[in-house]
């Protein structure tokens, strides 16, 4: 089968306050999203695999300090950075994920290493060792440090929570269908500002914040991770499509608006099916997001 | 509502070789299972909550060195013990889980502490700290050491894998419905003999090896964890009931036989619905298991 490829990405969701947004900052977010779309498109346009496209798109988002993943990750209550990432291949449901790592510049590439191993999820130092053995690039504290995140931690610890929640507990992610009709999803996060050390959110939880299956859809979520886990948000979209005959849009909207929203599950997600349909529902003020389909212009959006 | 309470437990599934089973050993397994059922029944008979019943049943299984959880946990390839556990309350989908911990005698009690916190999953030292602060009992290396597990590691490292897989990558778990119609699930494991350090299996993954929702069912799985995660086994049973109108038995059997079995997902699970129906499907030679319902005799089983 040779279909139309499609790619959707997100860079976090929340009450993105217009009052705190300047034209320059807004332009920088759009630029960051466009670069990530371009990285994925380069793969898809050349007949590459969805799995590689979502990985490259997420790498671009991790490299951009504006988003809470990789460089620019937020700080835990202990002043450390702990990153989680996952990637899933819709062809065979192979999946790889890492949790609580610091060092590798691109946690999603470490998740990609795990995908090729017998494990699905590896936490902490052993995952960092894998990255080192594979020769992946590392960053030191200076590389990962951003003044804005450090300030956000001080504000959170002081009980002031007017920092943009989309950055405080943001996540980046990508979903794609390639020209061969294969789906994939990838998600990466620095977690929540001031989070308890050791806390693992929905990003590396297959079926929670990340899921891909050629039979239905690929999903990457962002928001209040615990609620995404408890409602198995990503897997539930696939289940509604398989068992209730819902379309991608119906299933994704139902999960975000009817399952997550009433249960304090602020956030959103991006999803794609094998026909290139894209859904990007969110139940908060905004979500940094972008999409592009074969033969169409790339679009990047922040508010509704 | 005042319904009929029910409880089902498991102590691992696999190719439990009859050739390696002696009458004494078999009796010891049945005894261990009966003690765990009795611990849960004490709670349920007095009108207690399913959440407490599954916790107490799993504590009893963790305290029994025959099963791979708590005391008697298997060793990683590095000769360490890393335990995972989860508990979920069907009333509100509150969930708590821990991964990669060593020290607390009963990992399921640490998961129970997490359930009352904003997090769902906490890994490593911070989870152990929670247990210490709460005054939970700890064990040292001598407490957790069993000669059989240590020998099993040496055999695995030497490439001899004739140890009972149900113990090599076993898990213990319990599901219950209480007299008030509330459901709960709990699972605990020492992981896989010779597993890679840092590897997290399906036990603490909500929707993978553990799930509970009053609307459908409570599920606890045991087996090849990575496949349970990739097929979101526990959540899929609930989804089939909600969206495809399947009964507990239909849904649980389909997941174990049609989703897991063809994909190298050796194992089984125990599940219960709010009417007190129990399903205990497995796709391998045996599963240490037991069940009891209000007004019925407790049953414990190993083979088909």
Image: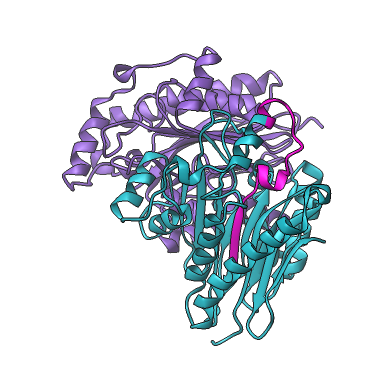
Chain colours: A cyan, B purple
The residue lying toward the viewer, choosing from A218 and B107, is A218
Bounds of the magenta span? A155-175
Q: Residue shown at 67%/60% (left/top)?
A: A28
Q: Does the segment drawn in magenta span residue A246?
A: no
Q: Is residue A87 left or right of residue B164?
A: right
- Residue A213, position in %: x, y? 56, 66
Q: Does the segment drawn in magenta span residue A160?
A: yes
Q: Is residue A6 above or below residue A118?
A: below
Query: In which quadrant is the N terminus of chain B drawn?
Result: top right
- Picture quarter containing residue A114? bottom left
Q: Residue shown at 60%/55% (left/top)?
A: A172
Asked if residue A229 shows in the view, the reply is: yes
The residue lying toward the viewer, choosing from A78 and B8, is A78
- Residue A66, position in %: x, y? 62, 52
- Residue A265, position in %: x, y? 74, 45
Q: Is residue A231 left or right of residue A21?
A: left
Q: Residue shown at 49%/52% (left/top)?
A: B228
């Amino acid at each position: 089968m040779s279909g139309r490829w499609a790619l959707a990405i997100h860079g976090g969701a929340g009450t993105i306050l217009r009052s705190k947004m300047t034209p320059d900052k807004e332009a920088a977010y759009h630029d960051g999203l466009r670069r990530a779309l371009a990285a994925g498109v380069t793969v898809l346009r050349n007949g590459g695999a969805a799995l590689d496209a979502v990985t490259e798109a997420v790498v671009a988002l991790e490299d951009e300090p504006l988003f809470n993943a990789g460089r620019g990750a937020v700080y835990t209550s202990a002043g450390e950075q702990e990153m989680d990432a996952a990637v899933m291949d819709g062809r065979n449901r192979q999946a790889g994920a890492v949790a609580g790592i610091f060092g590798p510049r691109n946690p999603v590439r470490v998740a990609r290493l795990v995908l090729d191993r017998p494990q699905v999820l590896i936490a902490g130092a052993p995952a960092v060792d894998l990255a080192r053995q594979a020769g992946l690039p590392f960053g030191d504290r200076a590389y990962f440090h951003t003044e804005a995140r450090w300030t956000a931690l001080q504000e959170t610890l002081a009980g002031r929570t007017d920092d943009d929640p989309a950055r405080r507990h943001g996540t980046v992610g990508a979903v794609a269908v390639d020209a061969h009709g294969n789906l994939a999803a990838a998600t990466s996060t620095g977690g929540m500002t001031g989070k308890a050390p050791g806390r693992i959110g929905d990003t590396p939880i297959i079926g929670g914040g990340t899921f891909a299956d050629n039979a239905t859809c690929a999903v990457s979520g962002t928001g209040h991770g615990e609620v995404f886990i408890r409602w198995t948000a990503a897997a539930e979209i696939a289940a509604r499509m398989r068992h209730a005959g819902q379309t991608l849009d119906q299933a994704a909207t139902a999960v975000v608006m009817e399952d997550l929203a009433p249960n304090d599950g602020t956030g959103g997600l991006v999803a794609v099916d094998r026909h290139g349909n894209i859904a990007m529902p969110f139940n908060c003020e905004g979500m940094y997001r972008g999409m592009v389909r074969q033969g169409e212009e790339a679009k990047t959006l922040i508010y509704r």
